[in-house]
Image: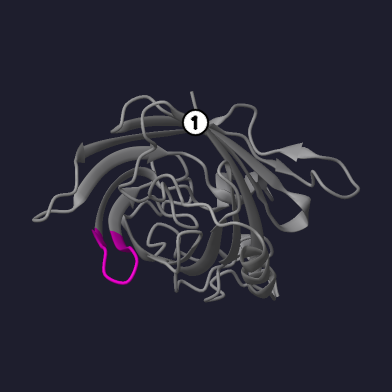
């Protein structure tokens, strides 16, 4: 229904072109960076009334910084709960620009996980998100212009902070983005979650993983010259066995140049 609504609105409203390549797909980082002099403020609305605000800024064309701060149960009744007492950080530097012969390559750090943050459960110190952050990562991206831009993304990452479960394997992720027109793009990604595939029976009621990784998909719409909207489906593969439904998310991105 969201896709039908967005497509219908795009026919009625003037279309706006996306100003820069995707910095991230649904969750995985790409080799895209925010251009120098651009900044963005995005907010992701997630399950159980949670929100995830994030501010990003392009320092140079190849170097960008970001801060994010999640709050659970922000919308609805009950007590709000912040994920951590301090913001999470995103740092990304593009080592090589894309050329005709080689892809773009970045190295970065992203400490922002997805979903709830768990400090402790049944005397077990967790110190982790439902879906672990990417931590230190290395990503490459390659784009083709045939019939609208098509981008393929691949990367490796190692989580440096959420390893109390003794599962700290190097992880693999990959994904694609495809322009449908100047305003609309579709995304697909797969996070193998190799650093989160060990089962702990004592955590079955809050963190119960199948070990199959996370398959996610999304649609991005450049609604105006300064606003982009995303509708994302997180964990289509149902790796998280604590939920009976696909995790639906809405992201609003405001960006500007100064």
Q: What residue is disc 1 on? A: 39
Side (left or right) of 115 relative to 175? right
> Residue shown at 19%/37% (left/top)?
95
> Residue shown at 28%/33% (left/top)?
62
State how the image is colored. Answer: one colour
For numbered disc 1, what is the local secondary structure? strand
Expressed as whole percent of the image width and height from the top left, the position of residue 156 reads: 28, 53
Side (left or right) of 17 relative to 108? right
Q: Which one is in front, 239 or 70?
A: 70
Expressed as whole percent of the image width and height from the top left, the position of residue 214 reads: 48, 67
Q: Which one is in front, 175 or 151?
A: 151
- Write down the quadrant of residue 80 in the picture: top right
Quadrant location, the N terminus:
bottom right
The magenta region covers 143-153
Q: Which one is in front, 145 or 102?
A: 145
Asked if 92 appears above or below 236 in the picture, the reply is: above
């Amino acid at each position: 229904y969201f896709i039908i609504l967005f497509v219908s609105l795009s026919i009625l409203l003037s279309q706006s072109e996306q100003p820069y390549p995707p910095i991230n797909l649904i969750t995985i980082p790409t080799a895209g960076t925010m251009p120098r002099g651009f900044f963005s403020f995005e907010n992701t609305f997630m399950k159980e009334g949670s929100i995830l605000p994030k501010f990003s800024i392009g320092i140079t064309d190849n170097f960008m910084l970001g801060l994010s701060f999640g709050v659970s149960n922000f919308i609805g009744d009950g007590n709000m709960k912040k994920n951590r007492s301090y913001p999470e950080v995103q740092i990304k530097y593009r080592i090589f620009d894309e050329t005709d012969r080689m892809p773009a390559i970045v190295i970065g750090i992203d400490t922002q996980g997805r979903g709830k943050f768990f400090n402790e459960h049944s005397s077990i110190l967790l110190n982790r998100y439902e879906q672990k952050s990417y931590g230190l990562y290395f990503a490459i991206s390659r784009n083709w212009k045939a019939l609208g831009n098509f981008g393929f993304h691949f990367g490796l990452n190692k989580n440096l902070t959420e390893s109390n479960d003794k599962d700290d394997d190097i992880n693999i992720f990959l994904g694609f983005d495809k322009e449908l027109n100047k305003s609309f793009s579709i995304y697909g990604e797969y996070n193998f979650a190799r650093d989160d595939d060990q089962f702990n029976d004592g955590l079955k009621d809050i963190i119960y993983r199948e070990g199959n990784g996370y398959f996610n998909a999304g649609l991005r719409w450049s609604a105006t010259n300064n606003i982009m909207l995303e509708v994302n489906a997180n964990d289509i593969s149902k790796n998280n066995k604590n939920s009976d439904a696909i995790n639906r998310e809405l992201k609003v991105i405001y960006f500007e140049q100064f």
